[in-house]
Amino acid sequence: MAEPHDPVGAFIPGPRITLPGAASGPLAGLSFGLKDLFDVAGHVSTFGNPDWARTHPPAVVTAPCVTMLTDAGAAMVGKTVTVELAAGLTGENPWYGMPKNPVVPDRVPGGSSSGSAAGLAAGLFDFSLGSDTAGSVRIPASYCGLYGIRPSWGAVNACGVLPLGPSFDTVGWFAREAALLRRVGEVLLPLDPPRALGPLLKVEEAWMNADPAVAAALTPALARLETAFGRAIQVEVAIEGLHAFFDAFRACNNEENLCALGAWVASVKPQLSPAVQARFDQAAHQPPAKTAWARHLRATAGARIRGLLGGGAVMVFPTSPIVAPRRDVGPQEIQEIRERTIGVTSFSGFSGAPEVTLPVARVAGAPVGLSLLSAPGTDRALLALAERAAAVLELP
């Protein structure tokens, strides 16, 4: 049950795990929530599953990215709920509960960084750390009306972060302001080579994939950005089809999930939700030919995307094709949402490129985000561009 000062159920059950921040530094005086798959010395990360917590010892050292934040002055005020084994986009956890979405309480917060997003949207901390494999920062940010970043793959040290799909896993973060999203990046990210970003590229199939109401709500924001940064050039990225992108991502991720966690699942035989158990069952029987096809599509699509971005161009598209689903959404609808969503979130997964989502609009009161995606290694430049875009759009 949530504690009185946790009205949305963002923190994991039990005694609060905290870390003090240094007395001075660029983030001094700020607080952050930490997704419960980052190591904190002396504590077990539950990974959203009681059997994982039961069968693993306390961490010996704190994840370096967490130490970088506390050394910069930020205080970690609690570990936040994650979807079981970080495998899910809605935010549901059968063991620790689904956090409430503070903006639209009848809708899901998004996953797998559900507690980090919900707690930040509820004002329980100043920023929060999550992980993003298939959209686990970007989608909760869109659903909860937050800024979020999935950085370039490998840009932020992921040591001490429990793995799901290691060649896709990234350390990302959320903020309520574009300026703070950038300030956190100045602590965590390596330096970019100086470069200007532009022009904008409108990814046509991603806009067509979005619900008409979502596309209509985001179109005025794109028009204002075009006024400031120049007319967007229409491009096509998923020439194989967004469903093929989803299928390839899932096949690649299945293989990596099995390599990262399969031995534990086979030896411990943990209690898993039916959806997560089905993923491991599917992965164990995936034909090698399908894996080979998926790896080839990933490589081909990634090279295509990096080529489009190589001169400094920035893709712009709806972060999520839909607003947050209602909390009672059924499994068939969840699967349809997953396929439409990951078809687009895989752009950055395949290319290793950074993506920032901005909370630019609402549909019937529910937030929707607009994404900016630039070439790998341009993370700081992208955060600066996102801050400029927020000013152009006069976001609060």
Image (spheres, rainbow, N blue to C red):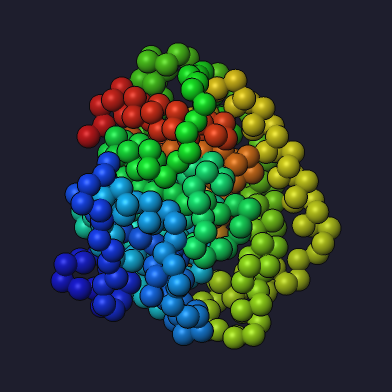
Whether residue 127 can be seen here: no
Quadrant for the C terminus in the image: top left
User: Against 251, is 9 above or below?
Assistant: below
Identity of the residue furthest to the left in this view: 4
Q: Is residue 153 left or right of residue 253?
A: left
Q: Position of residue 229 (x, y in %)?
A: 42, 16
Give x and y (percent) for residue 41. 39, 70
Say left or right for 229 vs 296: left
Q: What x and y, as percent, mark residue 76?
A: 28, 60
Task: Please state which of residues 276 and 28 is positioned toward the viewer in this rendering.
Answer: 28
Image side of residue 333 versus residue 24, left or right:
right
- Where 226 falls versus 394 (above or below)? above
In front of the other: 242 or 29 = 29
Q: Position of residue 188 (x, y in %)?
A: 42, 45
Examine the image and state in which quarter residue 112 appears.
bottom left
From the viewer's perspective, is 220 left or right of 22? Answer: right
The relative height of residue 170 versus residue 307 in the rendered view (above or below) is: below
Q: In the image, what residue occupies the spot 39% across and 62% down? A: 35
User: Does residue 179 appear in the picture of this structure?
Assistant: yes
Q: At x 26% / y 44%, what residue is drawn?
A: 25
Taking the spot 56% from the left edge, 63% from the top edge, the residue there is: 163
Figure quadrant of residue 124: bottom left
Which quadrant: the N terminus?
Answer: bottom left
Residue at the limit of the structure toward the right, as seen here: 289
Q: Identify which residue is drawn at 22% across, 47% down.
A: 24
Disc tally is: 0
